[in-house]
Image (cartoon, rainbow, N blue to C red):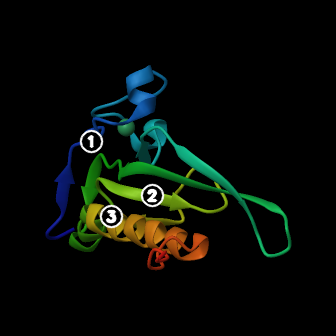
Amino acid sequence: MTDAIVIHGWCANFCQSAICGDLPTNGADPDEHGRWCHSRTMFVEGIDVGGHQRVAYVEAVAEYVHGVLTPEQNALHNRLYNVVGLSIVGGPDPDIVLTAGEARQLAAALNHFADVVTGIDRPAPRYR
Ligand SMILES: [Zn+2]
């Protein structure tokens, strides 16, 4: 394999499984550690348009790699390292990952639209 890149596995400092000692950490085989380092999970319950309960999860995640990557795999790994994972359904992997900037953009949009739907973005009423 040409241009192979050797990556030593380092757990993210927020990896809850490593902090708790539930999983092997730095240098561990990815089959033992799992693909992701996960932080604590924050969740919110909502409903879908059919009225069924749905849960959205948000957490810090980092792809855990220990081994040899192609340049293409390494480029994707760099995009999946220390990102914010968002999952609508739940499960072991995030449905989408966001950079810190993208996560802040989403958070700002969520705050903005929460203001819009509750009407607090309107001008204050004037009383005489
Ligand atoms: Zn980890």
Element at label 2: strand
Which image quarter: residue 103?
bottom left
Give the distance between the C-alpha atoms of the residues marked 1 and 2, in whole angstroms: 20 Å
The foreground one among 76 and 68 is 76
The foreground one among 58 and 49 is 49
The foreground one among 112 and 27 is 112
Q: Which residue is mark 3?
A: 104
Task: Please give the name of the residue rendered at 39% of the width and 50% of the height, measured from the top-left corner.
Answer: 61
Which image quarter: residue 68?
bottom left
In the image, ligand 1 is in what quadrant?
Answer: top left
Q: Which residue is mark 1?
A: 9
What residue type is disc 2 on?
Answer: Gly
Q: Which residue is mark 2?
A: 85
Task: Tell me which numbered mark, 3 or 1, is placed earlier along the sequence.
Answer: 1
Please say if 97 is above or below 28. below
Please say if 18 is above or below 83. above
Residue 97, x across and y down, in percent: 42, 64
Q: Judge from the rendering whether residue 50 lies leftward or rightward of residue 32; answer left or right.
A: right
Element at label 1: loop
Element at label 3: helix
Task: Please give the name of the residue rendered at 49% of the width and 74% of the height, measured from the top-left corner.
Answer: 127
